[in-house]
Image: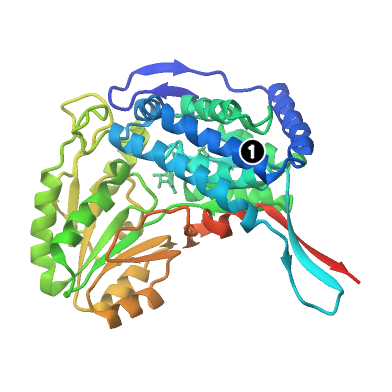
Amino acid sequence: MAIATINPATGETLKTFEALNDAEIAAKLDLANQAFEQYRQTSFLTRSHWLQKAADILEQDKAEFAKLMTLEMGKPFKAAIAEVEKCAVVCRYYAEHAPDFLADVSVKTDASHSFVRYQPMGAILAVMPWNFPFWQVFRFAAPALMAGNVGLLKHASNVPQCALAIEDIIRRAGFPEGVFQTLLIGAAKVADLMADDRVKAATLTGSEPAGASLAVAAGKQIKKTVLELGGSDPFIVLESADLETAVVTATTARMLNNGQSCIAAKRFIVAEAIADKFEKLLLEKFEALKVGDPMQPDTDLGPLATPGILQDLDQQVQGAISSGGKVLTGGHPLSDRPGNFYPPTIIIDIPPETPIAKEEFFGPVALLFRVPDIDAAIKLANDSPFGLGASAWTTNDQESDRLVEEIEAGAVFINSMVKSDPRLPFGGIKRSGYGRELSIQGIHEFVNVKTVWVK
Ligand code: NDP
């Protein structure tokens, strides 16, 4: 895939970039390692100060960064602004809390003094996707840098200007040269990086094949990885639910980021008793969404990020129809305009056991299933290769307890959509990946947990 900015709303190529050659990559790895030796000696106070400064820059120039995101991957401008603001929040969160999260922990044993110390590992590679081009990077960088690691970013090839802007923000915030570098390289170079002694560990957010390939390369070198992969999150609505709120949230949860979010609600599992009403209200909400230029403030749904994503999504929709699904609205790319536009789409009546029903639909397509009761709802929710998040709606405490206990996922949200929050861990089980980001768990992923025993 060429490293380039291609406006997904018009198809126009705006800027192309040369990938780094091997010598340039080697120079950056050397610089990262030299920087680490000095950087690991800096105090939490100094790192916090720089990270707060990064938050200031993000807040001051949010419109500029948001515009870049919308231009490169098509998310609505207002959502891009919110994304930049959230990046500032995660920087401030770790600037404030990392010293506590990483403080020595005394443990009483038969030693005269024993404790746990958290130490940085070195250069950590972050292979990141285009869907939240700023957020995904800052949620890695903020804890990694506070822990004393240095970062190497291999961003998705369609968001190179975002990648360079992030490097620039971190540098301008005061972090020393080499502490955070963007590598403009294609995916084919990632395995070589994992084989290089100068890279100590890696995190990847993206598709299953990309995650598996990184894990193979890292496994050969016995290096740690964190993987945040796809999801086909259930959105369960039981009979006692507040239906109006559930439908409004269902629409937001499915359309988030033009439908391209790993934690977007994708499978809507609704109790038969309220299914007709839910379906009717959801259809109204979907048909009221404004599809168009993502730069316009009143646009709800912009284009998909690339022609490939559009094509894949449409193939899945056609597959769902051949498997017995019926389209209530949408169902074809919008061919009346340039760009990668797909309309809000609802598909009902897909047999849950068909393979297509178990795939991740990365776009504005809702699959609707009817179930007789909570047992069937939980069974269908868990009948997925993924296990990232789940949203469930009920006003009954016993049902709520069962949903929390029995749903197989990294997160269960009751009467709310699934969202990430710096204060809570984020990650999946099953084919959605492993490891956690954010919160105290996130900062502990890339540190040496050193046991110290003093007799
Ligand atoms: P990819 O997984 O291909 O891309 C994500 C990142 O991984 C990019 O930086 C990409 O680089 C890199 N990458 C791709 N292949 C490899 C590899 N073999 N080894 C190492 N790194 C690799 O996502 P796509 O953009 O192709 O999207 C395809 C599907 O992935 C989506 O439809 C969706 O299902 C899922 N996805 C999930 C995301 C999530 O948030 N969990 C985010 C994005 C996608 P490059 O761009 O250079 O190829």
The relative height of residue 264 versus residue 333 in the rendered view (above or below) is: below
Q: Residues within 10 Å of mark 1 (few under 14, many from 20)?
A: many
Which quarter of the figure is the C terminus placed in? bottom right
According to the picture, the residue beneath numbered tag 1 turns out to be: 151
Residue sitting at x 39%, y 27%: 72
Residue 108, by quadrant, is: bottom right
| Foreground pick, 12 / 84 | 84
| Foreground pick, 226 / 346 | 226
Amino acid on which the number 1 mark rests in the picture: Gly
Residue 432 shows in this picture: yes
Q: Is residue 213 left or right of residue 69?
A: right
Q: Helix or strand or loop: what does disc 1 sit on?
A: strand
Query: Horizontal and vertical percent for residue 168?
Result: 55, 25
Residue 322 shows in this picture: no
| Foreground pick, 18 / 96 | 96
The relative height of residue 355 versus residue 44 in the rendered view (above or below) is: below
Residue sitting at x 41%, y 43%: 86
The relative height of residue 48 versus residue 307 in the rendered view (above or below) is: below
Residue 13, by quadrant, is: top left
Query: Horizontal and vertical percent for residue 284?
Result: 9, 51
Query: Horizontal and vertical percent for residue 261?
Result: 37, 47
Q: Is residue 352 left or right of residue 157?
A: left
Report the colour scheme. rainbow
Residue sitting at x 22%, y 56%: 250
Residue sitting at x 74%, y 39%: 196
The relative height of residue 307 versus residue 353 in the rendered view (above or below) is: above
Q: Is residue 389 left or right of residue 201?
A: left
Q: Is residue 156 left or right of residue 183?
A: left
Which residue sits furthest bottom? 398
